[in-house]
Image (cartoon, grey):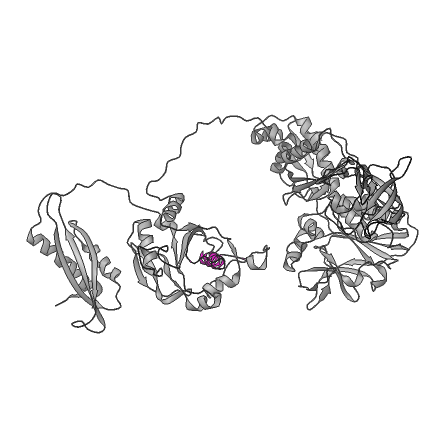
Amino acid sequence: MQFSEAWLRSLVNPALDTPQLAHALTMAGLEVEALTPAAPTFNNVVVAKILTAAKHPDADRLRVCQVDVGEAEPVTIVCGAPNAAAGLKVACARPGAKLPGIEIKVAKVRGIESFGMLCSTRELGLEGTADGLMVLDADAPVGKDFRAWLNLDDTLITLKLTPNRADCLSVQGLAREVGAITGAEVCLPQVQEAPVRIKDTLSVSVTASEACPRYLGRVVRGVNAQAATPRWMAERLERSGIRPLLAPIDITNYVLLELGQPMHAFALSRLHGGVEVRLARPGEKLELLNGQAAELAPDMLVIADSSGPVALAGIMGGQATSVERVTVDVFLEAAFFAPTAIAGRARRLGLSTDSSHRFERGVDFGATRQAMERATQLLLEICGGQAGPISEAVTSLPQRQPITLRLARLKRVAGIELDADQVARSLAALGAAVERRADSLVVTPPSFRFDLAIEEDLIEEAVRLFGYDNIPAQPPAAPSRMLPQDERLVADDTLRQMLVDLDYQEVITYSFVDPAWETALDAGVRPLLLANPLATQLSAMRTTLWSGLIETLRHNLNRQQERVRIFELGRVYLSDAEQPMKLGGLAYGDALPEQWGAASRRVDFFDLKGDLERLFGHTFDARSSAHPALHPGQSAELWVDGRAVGWIGALHPRLVQALGLPAAPVLFELDSVLLARRGLPHHATLSRFPQVRRDLAFVLDSHTPAGELLAALHKVAPAQIRSIDVFDEYRGKGVAENQKSLAIRVVMQDTERTLTDQEVEDAVQKLIDSARRQCNASLRE
């Protein structure tokens, strides 16, 4: 939220300068994100009036002006602005003035001395058109310091509020906070009931009572909608980021900023019958004030008359009933809409409005009538007219239950001794009703504090108002000890560093994804959908890391990066309870960076499989299997010690074509928790006895994976066998067409003695028997 410091100080003016005020707000939990001057630094600029403007004798585009600057005699100023004319009031920089990037001096312009400069908004560093002079209001006082007249020595304060502090989305709420923090006196706007001059009313009814517990309306006739918005109001609106439009509209925006209550003004002549607050009906549409034709969903709350919806409740009014310059009679509305009835609806339509921002977080239901009276008061003062009585529909409003704050618990949780009387005064300054008891405070939160519900909330308030920076730094009472680390687990940071050492780069992608991504990768998956997504393309929880990795690849390819090797370590969300940690990776392009020492070739399945085996120290059993997102002939399920741990393979051609990729990347995704377990290193004596090698050629079915054969051999291998490896595969003459020959190298060695021929033969026979039983393999003739 952005607001004018001068506006805030008109309600509460603590003895703090701007940086000190910003620090106090930040230390009370209201983070000040930015302090911006209302105008650039300049001086010696006054309000002036052009008395005459004659053509320069030696220049067609220059005018010689006689200017009243508030002194005894007018001064001569040569001006090149096309709109310079007699009678205008303008900003005049006197000799010696320092403007942004320029210093004004007495100078001759085509032979005529000029004693200053008439300024445009650009020359003063202000917003607005720079095509000519900045024309001031007719009531601008000649000779008055320009900065003082426009209150330019002001600061725009931008707060980064947390969602629970909706009460601070108004200047009145901020003034209340500053008063409680600093102890300064708070002078809130005095709202008087508007005199009722007419009896005209418009009937109001609420059928969606849970969504709208309170709705107020008032008819005001004889309004001059073309009346000028007062300069003080326009200034406050502009410095809060709202552009003045039309006086009745500006008044409702001003009440929103001042009191935090969104309001709307309808053109009364365009309403048909009474007003009803209800849920939208199937097929209903509404043209909003921004020109957007909104298709209304059944869970959207609308304001409707007999002809249909005229406003999207709590979000934006409709174009058909908007107030225009010719409007004479208006219908003002003020309401309390339940946050759950508004939350997410604006984003669903691609909107973000000041009203929805406040209603989603909670608006003070106890000040709705006050806001109506304030808006009526301003409307009558600025635009004239006569007000009718307020029509009101009220059902069941939220209740504020008393909360007991135990002083002993306050001390224990806060860790410091807080004066109970000071805590009571601070909470009372925020508008709470406080009852002092012997060992506790009973606090009833005000209607505008939706975030105060339990004892811990009050403890937080007490500490916050005390000031986070006032809490003394105390060393911990307990001794600090390092927690033990299980050496059998590979830490996540270690995994990351090892992958970086293998030439991968880490990426962090959104856990929120487009549901279309998930179904494209696996049509059978049912991702968890968010109840209130940030956007439609971020409305589901990811079930795989691949969607983020592939999107990162596309982002890099669009920026001419032809070799991409990336990984991510993060959770996937298979269900409410099942949320495993996964390690995903992607490689695309050449296997090695461009160089002279090796021929260029594309990265493939075996490159990634080798990287993973180096990473985890496991030999993976890659079993041919089908995954919906992977190429049918270039994918495998990875197994370790009889457990499936993940997938590896090239992206499916269907997805490659749909995504417009030049070639298929190779991906992997593993269960990082399972693979992070490793055995502890142990000492082994180096054998002084010779090794024995036996080469065995097994003939087996061509579809049987080599890993299955190796697993069968390892299962029965005696302790003397040091390694069993595949070193050749043969298909062709001498081997049946549906079979293959795998050459296996077996190395045996004992640390205590030389192996006998019989021991070697017995070990080899065990391997042969196991291969025959498990894989139907036989020795090649």
Relative to residue 659, is residue 443 depicted above or below?
Answer: above
Of 691 and 344, nearer the camera is 691
Residue 554 visible in the picture? yes
Which residues are drawn in magenta? Answer: 540-563
**Coordinates of residue 510 in the picture (x, y in percent):** 51, 53
49 to the left or right of 577: right
Q: Is residue 562 magenta?
A: yes
The N terminus - image quarter: top right
**Coordinates of residue 120 in the picture (x, y in percent):** 78, 46
**Coordinates of residue 671 in the picture (x, y in percent):** 38, 53
Q: Image quadrant of residue 91? A: top right
Q: Is residue 314 magenta?
A: no
Relative to residue 155, is residue 226 depicted above or below?
Answer: below
Residue 260 visible in the picture? no
**Coordinates of residue 720 in the picture (x, y in percent):** 15, 49
Q: Residue furthest right?
A: 197
Q: Going 50% across and 62% down the picture, which residue do you hit?
A: 517
Q: Image quadrant of residue 342? A: bottom right
Q: Residue furthest left?
A: 757
Of 257 and 140, nearer the camera is 140
